[in-house]
Amino acid sequence: DGGITQSPKYLFRKEGQNVTLSCEQNLNHDAMYWYRQDPGQGLRLIYYSQIVNDFQKGDIAEGYSVSREKKESFPLTVTSAQKNPTAFYLCASSTGSGEETQYFGPGTRLLVL
Amino acid sequence: EDQVTQSPEALRLQEGESSSLNCSYTVSGLRGLFWYRQDPGKGPEFLFTLYSAGEEKEKERLKATLTKKESFLHITAPKPEDSATYLCAHGSSNTGKLIFGQGTTLQVKP
């Protein structure tokens, strides 16, 4: 079955630690996205990538980094510079034509120890 | 500034009691209006995409409609399994970026 997988489902971060969230898709989509979801604030875009080896900052990129070395993979690193990382992180993908639907993965919940 | 606003924030219905959720937007060039359903602790599940005023789409008990400035998600004779948060989003540029509203949390009681 085609879809988007995210791992882990839960992730715990210690002070000063960088952590990486995985996102993989087998939909052959060109575009991939990372969103952060906080209660009462909806989804906010962190980074997006429309093609391999290229990515753009979204609205809240500070404290995060990404890479897009393969079409199917778009990992997100939450760095120690992100002072409030506790949130639900969602990865999405789309065909990349600009008006198309984005499909979401199951999410990763990041908690700070 | 492009903005999406959903109302109400929360809605409680009795099973079978029909109602509507509202999504209003200020956009410089609408490129699709999207509705998603999200269950607690899960990723959003795609429901509908609307592209032009007057367009309507239906799926089971749900019908989405679109005008120039807002969209409605009509829920007819809801069941408890329709309880979820419903998100609306619009695309506003050729980057494929979506701007989301805060969502409406629907609870349907038996």
Image (cartoon, coloured by chain):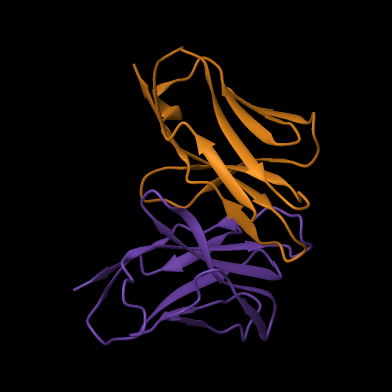
Chain colours: A purple, B orange
The C terminus of chain A is located in which quarter?
A: bottom left
Instruction: Please give left or right for residue A54 compared with residue A90 in the image.
Output: right
Between residue B39 and residue A80, name the one nearer to us.
A80
Q: In this picture, is B103 found above or below B92?
A: above
**Residue closest to the far left:** A113
Image coords of residue A85 (percent x, y) = 33, 71
Quadrant including the N terminus of chain A: bottom right
**Rendering coords of residue B58 (x, y %):** 68, 27
Q: How many marks?
A: 0
Residue at image coords 61%, 82%: A68
Q: Is residue A22 left or right of residue B92?
A: left
Left or right of residue A59: residue A96: right
Residue B70 figure quarter: top right
Query: Where residue B19 sits in the image (x, y, percent)?
Result: 52, 18
Near-viewer residue (A27 or A91): A91
Residue ranking furthest to the front: B1
- Relative to the observer, which residue lies in front, A71 or B4? B4
- Residue at the spot 46% in from the left edge and 74% down from the top edge: A22
Provide residue A54's location: percent of width, then percent of height. Answer: 68, 83
Can you name the residue that lies furthest to the top here? B16
Quadrant position of residue B24: top right
Residue at horizontal 53 percent and vertical 38 percent from the top: B6
* Above or below: residue A91 compared with residue A21: above
Residue occupying image coordinates x 43% and y 52%: A41
